[in-house]
Amino acid sequence: MNIVVAYDVNTETREGRRRLRKVAKACEGFGQRVQYSVFECSLADTDFERFRRKLVGLIDTDEDSLRIYTLRGRREEVVRVWGRDGYVDFRAPLVV
């Protein structure tokens, strides 16, 4: 399953800044950062559920916003990028 995760964490308080770091770190464990608060992830269904629960548990639903978009199709088919694209397909063959 290919997903895009976007979040906006209220950083006006120390606790908010802590939540932001935790959300970013959780996302780094499951995907690749493509924008400052946007990650692309390729996950198995079981990993997706674990990831979703972790993120929902980290945010403050009264202060923060979390969006998860499911991509239908391969990334190359459904994502258009203009400008820099640092995405690396780790499932592709590695050429040394």
Image (cartoon, grey):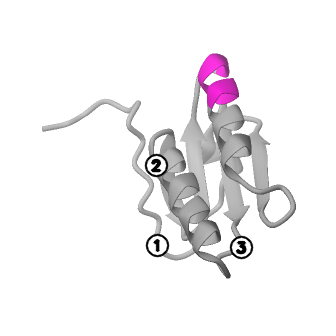
Q: Indicate which label's residue lies in the foreground, 2 or 1.
A: 2
Examine the rendered structure and indicate whether residue 88 appears above or below residue 12.
above
Q: Residue at x 55, y 70 (%)?
A: 36
The chief SS type of the magenta part is helix
Write the residue at 58% across / 29% down: 43
Q: Position of residue 19 (x, y in %)?
A: 60, 60
Instruction: Determine contact: label 3, label 2, CB under 8 Å.
Output: no
Q: Quadrant of residue 77?
A: top right
What's under tag 2, amino acid-wise? Glu
Q: Residue at x 58, y 64 (%)?
A: 20
As drawn, the label of residue 10 is: 3
Q: Quadrant of the C terminus?
A: top left
Q: Residue at x 71, y 73 (%)?
A: 10
Q: CA distance from mark 2 to mark 1?
A: 19 Å
Q: Is residue 81 left or right of residue 59?
A: left
Q: Disc 1 to disc 3, how far (Cα)? A: 27 Å
Image quadrant in which the N terminus is located? top right
Q: Sort mark 1 into few (<14), some (14-19) or many (20+) by Cα contacts within 10 Å.
A: few
User: For residue 36, which numbered disc appears in the image?
Assistant: none
Q: Return the disc, 2 or 1, that comes first in the chain's sequence.
A: 2
Residue that sits furthest to the bottom in the current view: 12
State which region is magenta: 45-50
Q: Magenta stretch containing residue 64, yes or no?
A: no
Task: Return the residue nearer the eye: 89 or 63.
Answer: 63
Q: Quadrant of residue 65?
A: bottom right
Q: Which mark is residue 84?
A: 1
Q: Which residue is mark 2?
A: 28
Mark 1 lies on a secondary structure that is loop
Residue 25 placement (x, y as % from top left): 47, 52
Q: Nearer the viewer, residue 41 or 81?
A: 41
Mark 2, Cα crowd under 10 Å, few <14 / some 14-19 / many 20+, is: some
| Name of the residue lying farthest toward the top | 46
